[in-house]
Image: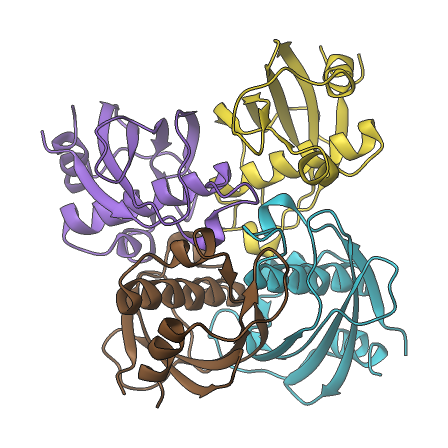
Chain colours: A yellow, B purple, C brown, D cyan
Amino acid sequence: MTAYETTLPVRFGQVDYAGIMFYPRFFDNFHAAFEDMFGDRLGVPYMSILTDRRIGFPTVSITTDFKKPFRFGEPMRLVVDVLRIGTSSATLRYRGFNGDSDEVSVEAQGTIVVIDLDTFETMPFPDDIRAVLEDLTA
Amino acid sequence: MTAYETTLPVRFGQVDYAGIMFYPRFFDNFHAAFEDMFGDRLGVPYMSILTDRRIGFPTVSITTDFKKPFRFGEPMRLVVDVLRIGTSSATLRYRGFNGDSDEVSVEAQGTIVVIDLDTFETMPFPDDIRAVLEDLTA
Amino acid sequence: MTAYETTLPVRFGQVDYAGIMFYPRFFDNFHAAFEDMFGDRLGVPYMSILTDRRIGFPTVSITTDFKKPFRFGEPMRLVVDVLRIGTSSATLRYRGFNGDSDEVSVEAQGTIVVIDLDTFETMPFPDDIRAVLEDLTA
Amino acid sequence: MTAYETTLPVRFGQVDYAGIMFYPRFFDNFHAAFEDMFGDRLGVPYMSILTDRRIGFPTVSITTDFKKPFRFGEPMRLVVDVLRIGTSSATLRYRGFNGDSDEVSVEAQGTIVVIDLDTFETMPFPDDIRAVLEDLTA
């Protein structure tokens, strides 16, 4: 098991009037980590899965605990792993840390399904994508 | 009990490559409904609570089920009510419907806390704000 | 000539650390007004032009002057008219006002082209869309 | 003169129904490059200028030509330089390239002013910030 880890900036445009990351913007970072994880682990850009293979991964549910705010300028270290894989769905966990801290500042569990982008029908994970997710399993 | 109801457009800029609302954008709509609810029920703009009274409502957790996609151009009817009020926190429920449908397409339960924006310390709900939330209690 | 006018809220999520609308967010409002204008004037939702007729309107250039900030909670009144129409391009003007003020707070001139969404090739304006834009001509 | 260069991903969440970057999202990338440039050249995070020194740089005008679309997955290479510096304003140029291409795909010229974030009054550039911008002058 090897969780995927990446560090994303907290941008001026993601920060609110109170100087902390506006909560909807966390989900952009989770998705960015999801994209980068596939690029890194599958060896082809995430977009090619969508455009060339016509496979998509809509999120059907997500639960998020915001434990500690992220201020503008603080890097967000994100660790992505997989809690569960089924035939055509999987639950990913996103844990965000303020820079070098080892205390979880935000934690989300999001469930995706695999669909055929032309029919929007559920389909089983292709083998190569399943292998990527299995390698992320805690 | 009178739930707050509003209808928000699904914008071109909120829709993804697959033609459906990108999941992080739902949270912008939930927050927009939260803002409009306060403006409507408190009789003053939501911003005045922040800027004049220096009170904020960060979201500390949110659970969301995306049951049915929203396509670009479909209006999102949002119904907001309150499931629980404590001294300094409350859980709001957001149910989204595709236009006139009476089937829930998205449902979220988000917990906010009340803070003093100058100290970021938790504080009890002021009476007028508590009254607004109590009126939304299911 | 009848310019299109609409009023859009300045949302918490569009406001930055300094309490004013972050400049990239203005363009979301301009596009929202563009969408609503078509819905209002053409009598069908803007999205149907894209999804049913496979016609798109990418912006090829835009010039914007931000004269006065918009604070969170101030409504943005937007007036949209057309400065020029060619065979397959048009220049629209967006003027934004802080609520009831008659002083222009933001002004943009954006040029769109008409494309076939399947080929990405430029095409002439269809007659009904041209008529909508001509009616907006100053 | 040493222009600042950075490469930013084109994210799924920035791409529209037509599969290309939605034009308002370019401005988020320009601002991200602006932030990263200051962090790199000033040696302290951009946010510290705002939060510690209470200095801000609102954009007062920007002109943008979108010459070639960016598709999801294509990296955007951004080159930032300075066309003009005055006492309390400067014009920056942003040129975006599709990955390794040496053809400009998007070009923007944006003018910022320097303000005191507590009074919103214009102020002269501090010497260290002026030096950073002068080093970027074409």
Report which quarter residue C120 is drawn in.
Answer: bottom right
Q: Please give the name of the residue rendered at 30% of the width and 48% of the height, measured from the top-left corner.
A: B8
Of residues B28 and D113, the one drawn nearer to the viewer in this rendering: B28
Report which quarter residue B65 is drawn in.
Answer: top left
Residue C107 appears in the rendering: no
Q: Position of residue C131 (x, y in %)?
A: 34, 78
> Is B81 on the left-hand or right-hand side of A34?
left
Q: Please give the name of the residue rendered at 57% of the width and 25% of the height, measured from the top-left corner.
A: A115
Of residues B11 and A29, the one drawn nearer to the viewer in this rendering: B11
**Location of residue A58 with respect to D99 vertically, above or below:** above
> Is A48 on the left-hand or right-hand side of B122?
right
Image quarter of the C terminus of chain C: bottom left
Of residues D115 and B45, the one drawn nearer to the viewer in this rendering: B45
Image quarter of the N terminus of chain C: bottom left
Of residues B15 and C1, the one drawn nearer to the viewer in this rendering: C1
Q: Position of residue B13 (x, y in %)?
A: 48, 54
